[in-house]
Amino acid sequence: MTHRPGLSFQFTHAITRTPANSVANGIRAVDSGDPSGEKFREEHELYVKALQEAGLSVDVLPALEAFPDSCFVEDPAFCLPNAAIQLRPGTQSRLGEGKEIRAALERHFEKVEVLPGNGHVDGGDVLMLDDTMLIGLSARTDSDGADAFAKLLGDWGYRAAVCETPQGVLHFKTACSTLGDGVILATRVMAESGFFDGRQVVIVPEGEDYAANVIRVNEVVLVPEGYPGTLAAIEKAGFKTVVLPTHEARKVDGGLSCLSLRFALS
């Protein structure tokens, strides 16, 4: 895969889904209380507005009460400029989400492929850079799924590499993000993993690991509220920021990248 400037952050469209009341039953690694569907929807509206103000046309899909985690649309699909992939999430309760989001993908893409084989990939384990795709093995993404995904990307002309997500990290992108222009934001553990050798890495300050999950959208970086050290580090690196509340999403292991599929259409 040749270097494609802006692939990882220059977008025209996004797909999101309204949080359901059933999000209170969402899966989580640590119980820090149930999110409120009402408060989550208020935060989600601010999120959608921020995407729109960054220049994106945003599809807001209706809530799915049967799937508590379905507002985290990044996990059941992956979008590229020319095609989309319906993934197979690695949690039993989320397996039906790929079929639910397929119609939204087909509205934008002529080519929508299903992840080959029987393996599992969560989109939260896939970090898109301008010159490669890093696929992290985790409790949600297994080697069969990652290898099948990497092969499909290779067939389409993209370079992909499969990585071992560090112990204790839920998703690969829980602990890192691209800021674009060759710069990575990462927790210290992820920065020391060797995945980003040769790239500029901005380290998330101690105690702010959650804030490693940000999204660069065109000319701005969306940053979770409440992490001043990370915000300052991103701005010091030369990026314009927008701060958004993610308090309800965090209660069910969600972050900013999880809440949308972002892609560029010509």
Image: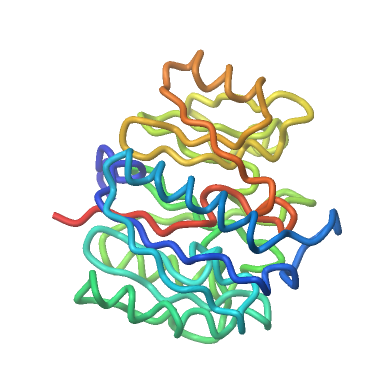
**How far from the left and from the top, in percent, is residue 166?**
72, 48
Q: Quadrant of residue 129?
A: top left
Residue 26 located left or right of residue 243? right
**How far from the left and from the top, in percent, is residue 194?**
61, 37
Q: Quadrant of residue 139?
A: bottom right
Task: Work out whether residue 166 or residue 40 is closer to the camera in this orientation and state it.
Answer: 40
Q: Residue at x 56, y 71 (%)?
A: 70
Instruction: Specify whether residue 142 is in view.
Output: no
**How far from the left and from the top, in percent, is residue 148?**
46, 74
| Outermost residue toward the top in this view | 236
Q: Residue at x 52, y 22 (%)?
A: 234
Q: Residue at x 48, y 28 (%)?
A: 198
Please tell me whether residue 89 is drawn above or below residue 132 in the rendered image.
below
Give the colour scheme shown. Answer: rainbow
| Outermost residue toward the left in this view | 266
Please tell me whether residue 81 is drawn above or below residue 77 in the rendered image.
above
Residue 233 located left or right of residue 104? right
Q: Quadrant of residue 223?
A: top right
Residue 92 located left or right of residue 55? right
**How far from the left and from the top, in percent, is residue 133?**
43, 52
Task: Work out whether residue 208 or residue 121 is closer to the camera in this orientation and state it.
Answer: 208
Q: Residue at x 62, y 68 (%)?
A: 141
Instruction: Specify whether residue 24 is in view.
Output: yes
Image quadrant where one finds the C terminus: bottom left
Q: How many numbered tags mark residues here?
A: 0
